[in-house]
Amino acid sequence: MSSLPAFAQFEEDAYEPDSIYAIRNAIKYDPVQIIVGDFSFYYERFLAPGWGAEAGVGFTRRNYAAGWNDYSLDNLARNVDIGTGYSYSLSLRKYLRAAEELGGFYTALGYSERKYYTTYAVVDTAGELTGDQFDDTRLHRTVSLAVGYQALGITSNLFVDFFIGAAVRFREFDTVVATDIFDASTFSVVPSNSTQWGILAGLKFGFGF
């Protein structure tokens, strides 16, 4: 008779949350995004068994992934000021297992936005600033569909969250170009709009509670 309650208890425990406390809130950071100059923190909240919502907010600096040839001007000169932009994201997650916490395999539909600012000051042939300057702004809007796995710890509330997926990026650029970097009259700001398909990938480290 005593073995039956023990077996029932084992069956119940098999579906209990697998970390120290049930993870219904999570704070994360993705160091991979530093490559694109995005310094954001993320917060995920448990909505219902198998469902979670994540929001991120941060700031942008230099986008190293843009490629050296993405800039028509020298973006490392002293007359170039890399400004601070903004970044935010929203994502809805559906976990494969309808558990009472945020863990396991999932699919996610997301939207994110990043804006970058760069100011180019004009210099003369002696390298002195002339007082003229032009603002370069680049806006990226991304819609993504990803799959991932959020691996919760058994003995710790620290975890990792890795994901990969497809993304559609809408780019709105006001790009500064010049034929002679020492002549302000040759500078211009060229607006452009484009759409690109790409891959979304990341690795977040987090703490759940």
Image (cartoon, rainbow, N blue to C red):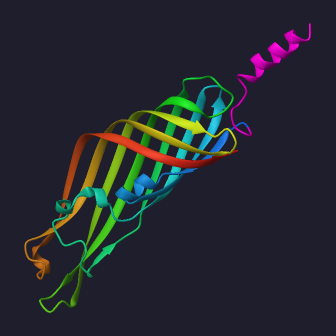
Q: Residue 127: x percent and y percent?
A: 18, 89
Q: Residue 80: x percent and y percent?
A: 27, 76
Q: Which image quadrant for residue 151?
A: top right
In the displayed image of the protein, which residue is found farthest to the right? 1
Q: Is residue 4 left or right of residue 145?
A: right
The C terminus appears in which quarter of the rendering? top right
Question: What residue is rendered at 56% in x and 31% in y?
Answer: 104
Q: Nearer the viewer, residue 208 or 134?
A: 208
Question: What residue is rendered at 49% in x and 56% in y?
Answer: 40
Q: Which residues are magenta?
A: 1-21
Q: Nearer the viewer, residue 147 or 72?
A: 147
Question: What residue is rendered at 82% in x and 18% in y?
Answer: 9
Q: Nearer the viewer, residue 28 or 83?
A: 28
Q: Is residue 189 above or below residue 181?
A: above
Q: Residue 39: x percent and y percent?
A: 46, 59
Q: Is residue 202 left or right of residue 13?
A: left
